Amino acid sequence: MTSDGKNSEKSNVPVELKYCEHCGGLWVRERGAGVVYCDKCQPKVADLPIPKKKPSRLRLPVGPHPQVKTFEGDVTEESSDLGAVGGVA
């Protein structure tokens, strides 16, 4: 690192790589900034109507598994023979 002899402080601003949530392009923003759209998409997104209702969180059904119904019918001797495959006994 070189010094020019002056007592100057460099201001380092931490940045992070971010993708635009509208166009998907990559850009750099200041770390911790809440901006999620690039400068090109900011005006486009501002013109969009405000949603009336926030999208709800998806929830998967949780609970006991449904009972599996079994077939209760007459089983013939031919259909219950699992050893015979492809016509070979």
Image (spheres, rainbow, N blue to C red):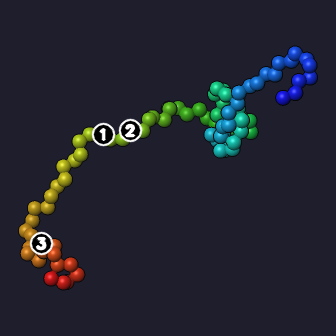
User: Residue at the spot x=16%, y=75% of the render?
Assistant: 83
Q: Is residue 5 left or right of residue 15?
A: right
Going by the image, does 65 lie left or right of 74?
right
Vertical order, 8 against 44 (above or below): above
Residue holding disc 2: 59
Q: Element at badge 3? A: helix
Q: Which residue is under mark 3?
A: 80
Q: Position of residue 24 (x, y in %)?
A: 65, 44
Instruction: Tell which tag, 3 or 1, sits nearer the viewer.
Output: 3
Quadrant into which the N terminus falls: top right
> Marks 2/1: CA distance?
9 Å
Q: What amino acid is labelled 3 in the image?
A: Ser
Identity of the residue drawn at 42% across and 38% down: 58
- Residue 38 visible in this rendered orientation of the protein: no
Quadrant holding the C terminus: bottom left
Which quadrant would residue 38 be assigned to in this image? top right
Residue at x-position 22% and y-position 47%: 66
Is the residue under label 1 in contact with that under label 2 (CB below 8 Å)? yes
The crowding category of the residue bearing disc 1, from other C-alpha atoms within 10 Å (few below 14, some 14 to 19, many at least 20), is few
Q: For the residue marked with disc 2, what is the amino acid?
A: Arg
**Amino acid, disc 1:** Val
Residue 85 is marked as none
Q: Residues within 10 Å of mark 3 (few under 14, many from 20)?
A: few
State the residue position of label 1: 62
In this view, the residue in front, 79 or 22, is 79
Q: CA distance from mark 3 to mark 1?
A: 36 Å
Specify which label sits upstream in the sequence, 3 or 1. Answer: 1
Q: Residue at x 71, y 39 (%)?
A: 27
Instruction: Assess disc 2: are there few (<14), some (14-19) or many (≥20) residues with their C-alpha within 10 Å of its C-alpha.
Output: few
